[in-house]
Image: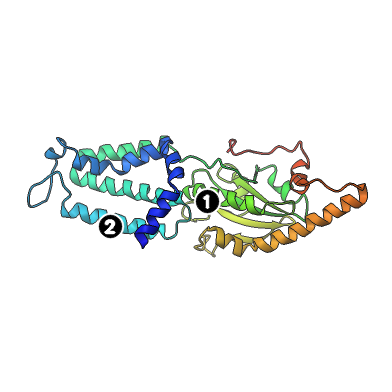
């Protein structure tokens, strides 16, 4: 049953996987993931490799290599239990496969190990995961616009993601946050993002650490009237984030998005009735969503490309 479910999930996401294969990051990651298996099985090359098999067959895995591969499988399965998106599942597979390949190559031949490790370093420095560029209703803040925007209207509730482009967790969470903005964005409930890896002052002011050891990235903070009301993940006395899964269900529950959205819809209707009474003209459909975007049109904002 589990095999059938996994196969159905793979076929469902096949178009998305196909698009990934067209990107250099995933192409290179795939080849680096299967590098050891290719070397071990390649005809003509595997004949000259060392092996600990009793039959002396150097073109097949020995018992120690099988142990390492089984351990890799167990680690990936454990990490993927906390994964939310398909990108996170694939990312965990690529990451730990590279680590296992480094160990396998060094065990096989120190020269191959040094070569593969150098390729991994070059890959990390030159090839970055592609940023999410899909549809969203998110406003990107800078260090000069975030305070003013949060305090502009006390009736507007903001959910702001504090992120850094170099964080793989932030990149994996981007589609989830975008999907939430498409479902819940309205005049009274807005979504925003700020790159604290780029703006250090914002990181200090809102007490969100960019250290990988703190594990505070990404951080979601709900603001009402410019004041912080809810923060996830929470931070303990030592400045470390309390473990929390950034799934769509958890965010909807912890931030009461359904309730906030209903209140915001009532606020929108009240604004519409006031405009109709004052002008004698009913508000156009979709005006509430565009109202906040049209406020202060000269205020500079950032786009995803600026990030």
Q: Residues within 10 Å of mark 2 (few under 14, many from 20)?
A: few
Q: How many marks?
A: 2
Residue at image mark 1: 173
Please, is residue 231 above or below residue 131 in the view?
Answer: below
Q: Position of residue 194 (x, y in %)?
A: 61, 46
Q: Residues within 10 Å of mark 1 (few under 14, many from 20)?
A: many
Of labels 1 and 2, earlier in sequence is 2
Query: Can you say which quadrant of the picture contains the C terminus?
Result: top right
Front one among 68 and 151: 68
Name the element at disc 1. helix
Q: Does 13 sit left or right of 47 as displayed?
A: right
Name the residue: 69% across, 56% down. Answer: 223
Q: Does 5 sit left or right of 115 as displayed?
A: right
Name the element at disc 2. helix
Front one among 218 and 198: 218
Name the residue: 28% across, 57% down. Answer: 71
Please, is residue 54 above or below residue 1 in the view?
Answer: above
Q: Position of residue 260 (x, y in %)?
A: 70, 61
Q: Position of residue 30 (x, y in %)?
A: 35, 41
Q: Position of residue 252 (x, y in %)?
A: 60, 61
Q: Does 79 sit left or right of 205 as displayed?
A: left
Q: Does 189 sit left or right of 275 as displayed?
A: left
As drawn, which residue projects farthest toward the left? 55
Name the residue: 29% across, 49% down. Answer: 100
Disc 1 to disc 2, how far (Cα)? 27 Å
Name the residue: 66% across, 62% down. Answer: 258
Front one among 84 and 302: 84
- Residue 71 is labelled as 2
Task: Quadrant for residue 134, please give it.
Answer: top right
- Residue 25 is labelled as none
């Amino acid at each position: 049953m589990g095999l059938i479910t996994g196969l159905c999930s793979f076929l469902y996401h096949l178009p998305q996987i196909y698009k990934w294969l067209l990107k250099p990051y995933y192409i290179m990651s795939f080849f680096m993931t299967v590098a050891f298996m290719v070397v071990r099985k390649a005809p003509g090359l595997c004949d000259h490799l060392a092996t600990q098999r009793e039959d002396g067959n150097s073109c097949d895995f020995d018992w120690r290599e099988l142990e390492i591969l089984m351990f890799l499988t167990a680690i990936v399965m454990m990490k993927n239990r906390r994964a939310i998106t398909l990108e996170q599942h694939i990312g965990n597979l690529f990451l730990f496969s590279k680590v296992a390949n480094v160990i396998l190559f060094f065990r096989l031949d120190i020269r191959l190990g040094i070569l593969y490790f150098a390729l991994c370093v070059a890959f990390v420095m030159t090839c970055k995961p592609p940023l999410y560029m899909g549809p969203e209703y998110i406003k990107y803040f800078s260090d000069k616009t975030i305070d003013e925007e949060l305090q502009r209207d006390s009736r507007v509730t903001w959910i702001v993601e504090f992120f850094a482009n170099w964080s793989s967790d932030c990149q994996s969470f981007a589609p989830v946050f975008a999907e939430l903005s498409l479902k819940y964005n309205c005049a009274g409930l807005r979504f925003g993002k700020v790159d604290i890896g780029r703006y250090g002052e914002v990181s200090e002011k809102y007490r969100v650490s960019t250290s990988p050891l703190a594990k505070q990235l990404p951080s979601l903070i709900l603001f009402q009237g410019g004041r912080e009301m809810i923060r996830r993940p929470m931070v303990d006395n030592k400045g470390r984030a309390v473990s929390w899964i950034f799934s769509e269900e958890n965010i909807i529950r912890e931030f009461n998005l359904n309730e906030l959205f209903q209140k915001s819809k009532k606020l929108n209707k009240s604004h519409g009735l006031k405009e109709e009474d004052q002008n004698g003209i009913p508000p156009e459909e979709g005006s509430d969503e565009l109202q906040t975007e049209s406020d202060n049109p000269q205020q500079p904002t950032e786009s995803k490309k600026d990030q």
